[in-house]
C-alpha cells in the first residue's frame, strides 16, 4: 500500500459517554450545545489521526438533530474521514444513544465537519489520499462531492444577487417578513 494513501478504516474513531443531569437543557433533554462540543472533539481526533497533524475546524457543514437524548443514556459517536482534498477532510459522524436498561438504541444525529490539517507553524499541510474499500465508502465520498458542489453554487449565487433590487425585495412578499428599509 502506498504510504501517501490511507484507508477510511484507519481514520475510524468512536467515543461513548454517559449523559448526566449536568448536560441537560431547560426541557430536561441533553443540550445540543454539549453534543456539538463532543462532535467537534471527535472530528478533531478523527482528522488528526488520519492526517498525522494538528487539525482545525473549518466549517460545520451539517448537524441534523434527529431525536432527543435523555439523561442516563449512553451516547456513542462514530467518526470517519469521508472525503479528502489537498489539506482538508470531511469527517462524517453518526451519533446513537442507548437506553442502558432496555438496550434500545436510536440514531440521534448525523454531522459533517470540514477539518483542515496544520503543521507545527500553523500552515496548512497536505493530507494523505483516501483508499475507498467498499461501496458505502464510495457513496459517502460522492455525497461529499455533491455537498461541495452545492456549497460552491450557493456561494456563487450570493455573489450574483443584488439583494436591494426591486425584484429581490418583491420576492420577500411570499414570506412572513416585513421589510422596513
Image: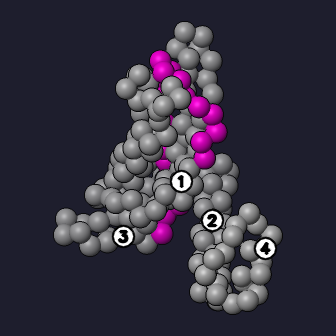
**Span shown in magenta:** 64-85
What is the distance, in whole Å, between disc 4 and disc 1 at their CAs?
Answer: 34 Å
Q: Quadrant of residue 102?
A: top right
With respect to residue 138, does 69 lie above or below?
above
Look at the numbered disc 2 and give the secondary structure of its residue: helix
Q: Earlier in the sequence, mark 4 or mark 1?
A: 1
Q: Earlier in the sequence, mark 1 or mark 3?
A: 1
Q: Say if residue 130 shows up in the picture.
A: no
Most foreground residue, 123 or 136: 123
Residue at (63%, 28%) from the top-left corner? Answer: 106
Residue at (53%, 29%) from the top-left corner? Answer: 27
Q: Are marks 2 and 1 in contact (CB under 8 Å)?
A: yes
Q: Earlier in the sequence, mark 2 or mark 4?
A: 2
What is the distance, in whole Å, between disc 1 and disc 3 at their CAs?
Answer: 20 Å
* Of labels 4 and 1, the one closer to you: 4
Q: How is the image coloured?
A: one colour
* Of labels 3 and 4, the one closer to you: 4
Q: Are marks 2 and 3 in contact (CB under 8 Å)?
A: no
Q: Which residue is tagged 3?
A: 126
Q: Which residue is tagged 1?
A: 112
Q: Position of residue 115 (x, y in %)?
A: 41, 60
Most foreground residue, 57 or 47: 57
Give the crowd class for mark 2: few <14, some 14-19, many >=20 residues within 10 Å. some
Q: Earlier in the sequence, mark 2 or mark 3?
A: 3
What main secondary structure does the magenta stretch of the protein show? Answer: strand
Q: Earlier in the sequence, mark 2 or mark 1?
A: 1
What is the distance, in whole Å, between disc 3 and disc 4 at their CAs?
Answer: 47 Å
Amino acid at each position: 500500500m502506498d504510504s501517501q494513501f490511507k484507508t477510511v478504516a484507519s481514520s475510524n474513531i468512536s467515543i461513548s459517554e454517559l449523559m448526566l443531569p449536568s448536560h441537560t437543557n431547560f426541557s430536561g433533554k441533553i443540550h445540543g450545545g454539549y453534543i456539538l462540543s463532543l462532535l467537534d472533539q471527535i472530528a478533531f481526533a478523527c482528522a488528526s489521526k488520519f492526517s498525522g497533524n494538528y487539525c482545525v475546524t473549518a466549517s460545520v457543514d451539517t448537524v441534523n438533530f434527529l431525536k432527543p437524548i435523555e439523561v442516563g443514556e449512553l451516547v456513542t459517536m462514530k467518526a470517519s474521514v469521508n472525503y479528502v482534498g489537498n489539506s482538508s477532510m470531511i469527517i462524517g459522524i453518526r451519533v446513537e444513544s442507548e437506553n442502558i436498561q432496555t438496550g434500545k438504541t436510536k440514531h440521534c444525529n448525523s454531522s459533517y465537519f470540514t477539518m483542515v490539517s496544520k503543521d507545527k507553524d500553523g500552515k496548512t499541510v497536505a493530507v494523505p489520499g483516501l483508499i475507498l474499500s467498499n461501496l458505502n465508502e464510495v457513496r459517502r465520498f460522492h455525497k461529499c462531492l455533491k455537498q461541495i458542489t452545492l456549497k460552491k453554487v450557493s456561494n456563487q449565487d450570493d455573489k450574483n444577487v443584488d439583494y436591494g433590487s426591486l425584484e429581490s425585495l418583491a420576492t420577500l412578499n411570499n414570506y412572513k417578513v416585513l421589510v422596513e428599509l
